Amino acid sequence: MSQDKKFDVMVVGELNVDLILNKLNKPPQFGKEQLADEMTLTLGSSTAIYAANSNSLGVDVAFCGKVGTDQFGSLVMNALADKGVNTDYVITDDQLKTGATVIFRYENDRMMVTHPGAMNHMTVPEVPDELFEKSRHIHTSAVFLQPGIKKDLVPLFRKAKAFGLTTSMDTQWDPEEEWDLDFERLLPLLDFFLPNDQELLQLTGASDVDGALEQLSGYDTCIVVKCGERGAVMQKDGTKHAIPAYDVSGNFVDAVGAGDSFNAGFIHGFVQGKPLKECLAAGNLAAAVSTTAAGGTDGIQNYRQVTELGNTLQLRGEKQE
């Protein structure tokens, strides 16, 4: 990190807890009581998971968001602090409740219900200039859950560019399924765009990932598409590079936060100055390791642990030696 910058990455985004109900005895149904064999209450929200795992990998991260003065808010703040994330720029509002997501997992599928709470009320003007001045890179995510951030994404990233920061964004799913994002103004301001395959198809209206990437081939942005068990594909300057996912079938617990962990691994590689193909591989590994524990942040402990576990995993399609 350059000596005049305190933080490798500033993160602007939503903060909430995740209540994960794992191993339901049958698919969720209204009007019936069901049982879950496992329960985890943990740090949630896309950008918070990204921030926590980035710091665990060795990236100096500061978070700017908003929580309420409640138990969930305390859990979020403590969890970020425990991971080493700087929380000096998190706003606490005693008039708001901290958001929460309840995740129901049955076999290989899941359903999520989110109460946005304070994340509805965070706005771009509340992000201080001081944080831009102290940071090298900015990341945000889950923009459809944050109306106050979403409406000013272009000014946010323009400001970041004016301060000399590199930029990245992951949209996450739009619960309203409107997918109203101003690509033409936004993508030129992004160094990295990190959706998953289903989000990219919804945003572009394309029928497959190749078609979607072709639509966006005129932008300088490095577009990185997460494709779950099929790995990931990256497009930069008209050139595509694909990588298969790791086989974690023997270690898999859940995929909560896997995409955010991918982002953490990728941007960790970028701020370390690694070539983009190595960044893609780093993101791929971080996503795999994150699925070996419940929730989005317990799987990734530190860079060495991720690397050592990665040495025991194989990419899908690789032959056993």
Image (cartoon, grey):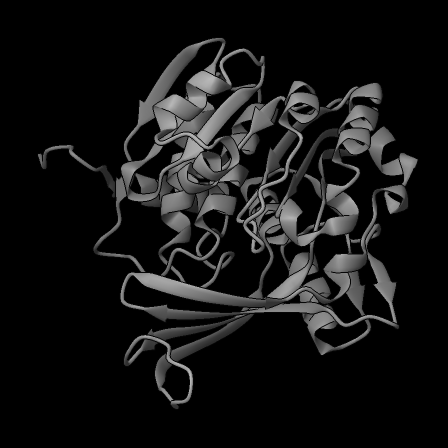
At a point 83% along the width and 42% down the height, the residue shown is: 124
* Image: 191 above or below 264: above
Please tell me whether residue 68 is drawn above or below residue 142 in the rendered image: below
Q: Residue at point 67% right, 30% down? A: 182
- Front one among 205 and 101: 205
Question: Can you see residue 93?
Answer: yes
Position in image of residue 61 (x %, y %):
70, 42
Image quarter in which the C terminus is found: top left
> In this picture, is 27 found above or below 219?
below
Q: Tell me how many marks there are.
A: 0
Task: Choose between 37 and 172: the one closer to the eye.
Answer: 172
Identify which residue, 264 or 148, lies in the foreground. Answer: 148
Q: Nearer the viewer, residue 53 or 172?
A: 172
- Specify whether residue 86 is in view: no
Left or right, 153 with respect to 267, comes to: right
Location of residue 265 in the rendering, given as x and y in whole percent from the top left corner: 49, 36
Please give left or right for residue 141 compared with residue 249 in the image.
right
Residue under the image location 38 percent in, 22 percent down: 211
Look at 54% across and 39% down and name the residue there: 264
* Position of residue 46 measured from the top left corner of the image (x, y, whole percent): 58, 51
Task: State the image coordinates of residue 191 (x, y, percent, origin top left).
Answer: 62, 21
**Quarter containing the N terminus:** top right
